[in-house]
Structure formats: C-alpha cells, structure tokens
Amino acid sequence: ADDDTLAPTLDWAVNHLDEPLTVEDLARRALMSPRTFARRFRAATGTTPQQWLLRQRIVHAQHLLEATDLPVELIASRCGFGSATALRVHFRRATGTNPLAYRRTFALAS
C-alpha cells in the first residue's frame, strides 16, 4: 500500500489470514473508523479491503500448493477459506484452474 499508516495493519492481516477478518477488525487495528479505513484503503490499494484479503488468501494458497504436500482441506483452513469447497470456488475464479491442477503444474520438485 502507498499509505504508510496502513502498512502495519496490512502486514498484520497477511500474518493472520487463517482468522476471520472484517473491515471493522482491520480498521480497529489501524485506529480508524471502518468508513475512514475503507476509504483510505481504496485510495492506497485501488481495491476494497475484502477483495484485497481474498487476493492475499489466494496468494497464500498458491504458495502452500507449490511448496507443501498439505491437503487442500488444510490449506483452505490455513488461508481462511473455511472449507475446501470455498477455496476451490475462489481459487478457480482467481486463477482459472483448481487447486490440484495448480499444484500439479507449479509444485516445487522434491
């Protein structure tokens, strides 16, 4: 983010993707009202907090699929999707493929 005041909150969020996170949670951490946080967040990132969180969760899932042999169910939990089904839906929408096909294509050789 271009806004230095948001950086600590975004760093914190990336380290807590496995938790349910709301705009209210993030705003509280940034010491702002939800409305101010959402407005400043969009100005700094060009997207909404929820879309940003979803993208960060997808990126984390991609990393876990590439670097580990964890089952998709556990990856979904570690990325904050709640279920493997939710991960599959969002992953396909974002990448055009499913998690297992992604893993087959991009997994690091052991």
Image: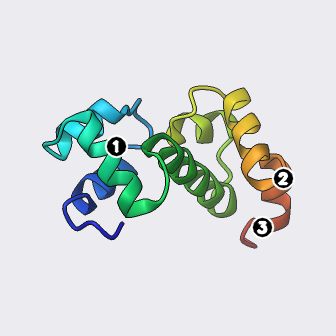
The residue lying at 77 percent from left, 55 percent from top is: 95
1 or 3: tag closer to the N-terminus = 1
Instruction: State if disc 3 and disc 1 touch (CB < 8 Å).
Output: no
Q: Amino acid at mark 3?
A: Phe
Place of residue 92 in the rendered image (x, y in percent of width and height, measured from the top left)? 79, 45
3 or 2: mark nearer the eye: 2
Give whichever of 108, 58 is nearer the camera. 58
Give whichever of 13, 23 is nearer the camera. 23
Q: Secondary structure at mark 1?
A: helix
Q: Amino acid at mark 2?
A: Gly
Give whichever of 10, 63 is nearer the camera. 10
Tell me the CA gap for discs 1 and 2: 28 Å
Residue 2 located left or right of residue 68:
left
Look at the image and tell me in which quarter the N terminus lies. Answer: bottom left
Mark 1: give few (<14), some (14-19) or many (20+) Cα within 10 Å: many
The residue lying at 66 percent from left, 33 percent from top is: 73
1 or 2: tag closer to the N-terminus = 1
**Rendered image: mark on residue 38:** 1
The residue lying at 27 percent from left, 34 percent from top is: 34
The residue lying at 35 percent from left, 52 percent from top is: 41
Q: Secondary structure at mark 3?
A: helix
1 or 3: mark nearer the eye: 1
Q: Quadrant of residue 26?
A: top left
**Rendered image: mark on residue 56:** none
Residue holding disc 3? 106
Tell me the CA gap for discs 1 and 3: 34 Å
Q: Amino acid at mark 1?
A: Ala
3 or 2: tag closer to the N-terminus = 2
Residue holding disc 2? 96
Instruction: State if disc 2 and disc 1 touch (CB < 8 Å).
Output: no
Place of residue 67 in the rendered image (x, y in percent of width and height, measured from the top left)? 63, 63
Q: Quadrant of residue 103?
A: bottom right
